Amino acid sequence: MDRKAHYAAVMWLDNSLLWRSEVLLYPQFRNGYSDIVFVASEEHAKGFPEDVIVAWPSVMTEGMLKIMNKEAIARQLDLSKLPLAHPWTMTDVLEKWEAFIELLRILDRSFHHSVMRQAEQEMYTFEAINNSRIRRWLAPGRLEKLNEIIKDKDISKHGLTWPVTEDDVRQKLEDVSNLVNPILMTRDEIDAIDSV
């Protein structure tokens, strides 16, 4: 599961825990989970066992893939020596993830950093990513379910007070997202928020 967690972080995949993917790199946040499964979208993330973390492409993932394909041509890479046929697809990212890890290993760090920089600057800014995460929190019923679950919990160390408002989501997105964790909530409570 460590390789999948690292991959989810590198590829900026969204996940069913509503945390940034890099949190999956820390084993304590994966306690109680047996696997990470990659699916095409959030809509495909339903119906998995409770002990499975489900991850899907984010806006940033899509931007990175688009730029990787463009950058490979611009750098005139010898595509015949790579483990996946070019152009690379989202199917490659999700279903051939081990081969995609090998591809990332072969491509040097400057390639990867260039792709990241371009994806952030030119196409999918941090603001766009946050707006996507904010929209998920403000989906009908999700914030209400969060407030129902945390009503009697001490959330002050997260810099928040009850009830968490839409303004809190917009201004303190990380703090709100960090409330959904296995230390503050039970698995059933986390699943209840995820199911909304």
Image: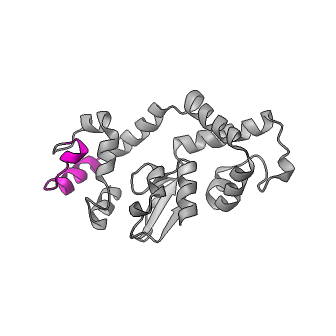
117 drawn magenta:
no
Q: Position of residue 174 (x, y in %)?
A: 34, 42
Q: How many marks?
A: 0
Q: Is residue 44 visible?
A: no
Q: Nearer the viewer, residue 193 or 5?
A: 5
Rendered residue at 53%/47% (across/down): 12
Q: Nearer the viewer, residue 62 or 43?
A: 62
Image quadrant where residue 123 sits: top right
Q: Is residue 55 above or below residue 129?
A: below
Q: Position of residue 41 (x, y in %)?
A: 51, 53
Q: Is residue 69 visible?
A: yes
Q: Quarter holding the C terminus?
A: bottom left
Rendered residue at 30%/37% (across/down): 172
Image quadrant where residue 98 sits: bottom right
Q: Position of residue 162 (x, y in %)?
A: 15, 45
Rendered residue at 33%/45% (across/down): 137
Residue at the extreme top: 122
Relative to residue 74, is residue 26 drawn left or right? left
The span picked out in magenta is 138-160
Q: Position of residue 169 (x, y in %)?
A: 29, 39
Image quadrant where residue 65 sits: top right
Q: Is residue 103 above or below residue 124?
A: below
